[in-house]
Image: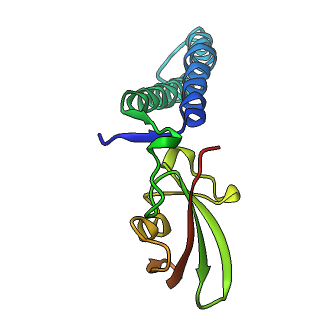
Amino acid sequence: MEKVYLTKEGLEKLKAELHELKFKRRPEVSQKVATAREHGDLKENAEYHAAREELSLVQTKIEQIQTRLAHAEVIRENDIKTDTVAILTSVSVSDIKRDKQMVYTLVSAEEADIKLNKISVASPIGQGLLGKKIGETAEIKIPAGIIHFKILDIKPALY
C-alpha cells in the first residue's frame, strides 16, 4: 500500500474512529451476536445472521483503518512546497469558461470534504491540478466534460 499523507488533525481523527470502533462499536455488535445466538436455531435466525454480518463489517473497517494508520505519514507545514500544486496546498483557480474563482485544498482521500472545498489528490480535479505552477492552465476531464482552470495562487494549507 502507498503512503497515506495526513495532517496531524487527520491522523487524530482516524485514531479516534479506530478507538470508537474497537472499544464501543465492536463490543456492542458482539453483544448483539451473543443475544441473537441465545434465540435458538442458528440456521433460521435472521437476527443472528444480520448481527454476524454487521460484526464482519465493523471488523473490516477496523482492519482498513489499521492499515491506513500503519502507512500514515504526517505532513508538517515546513514539508509543504508551494512552487507547484501538491498535497496540503490551497490553490486558487479561475474557471476560464465560467469566469469564476475558487480555492481548493488538496488533501488525502481520508480528509476530503467537498463542503469545505477539501478535494482528494486522487480525484479528477486533484489529479489535474497536481504539479501545476502559478500561471499555468490545467485541462481536467471530469464526468461532465472538460474544465480549464488557470492557477492563480498556491499556499500551504495546514489547518
Q: Position of residue 117 (x, y in %)?
A: 65, 60
Most foreground residue, 106 or 141:
106
Most foreground residue, 68 or 51:
68
Residue 38: quadrant of the picture: top right
The residue drawn where x is 58% and y is 28% is 12
Q: Position of residue 154 (x, y in %)?
A: 55, 64
Left or right of 21 in this view: 141: left
Residue 19: quadrant of the picture: top right
Which quadrant, please, contains the N terminus?
A: top left
Left or right of 30 in this view: 2: left
Left or right of 68 in this view: 33: right
Q: Position of residue 80 (x, y in %)?
A: 47, 48
Figure colour scheme: rainbow
Most foreground residue, 62 or 1:
1
Identify whether 82 is placed above or below 124. Answer: above
Q: Position of residue 90 (x, y in %)?
A: 58, 59
| Residue found farthest to the bottom | 97
Number of numbered discs: 0
Residue 10: quadrant of the picture: top right
The residue drawn where x is 39% and y is 66% is 131
The residue drawn where x is 48% and y is 42% is 78
Identify whether 125 is placed above or below 101. Answer: above
Identify whether 96 is placed above or below 113. Answer: below
Which quadrant, please, contains the C terminus?
A: top right
The residue drawn where x is 57% and y is 10% is 34
| Residue found farthest to the left | 1
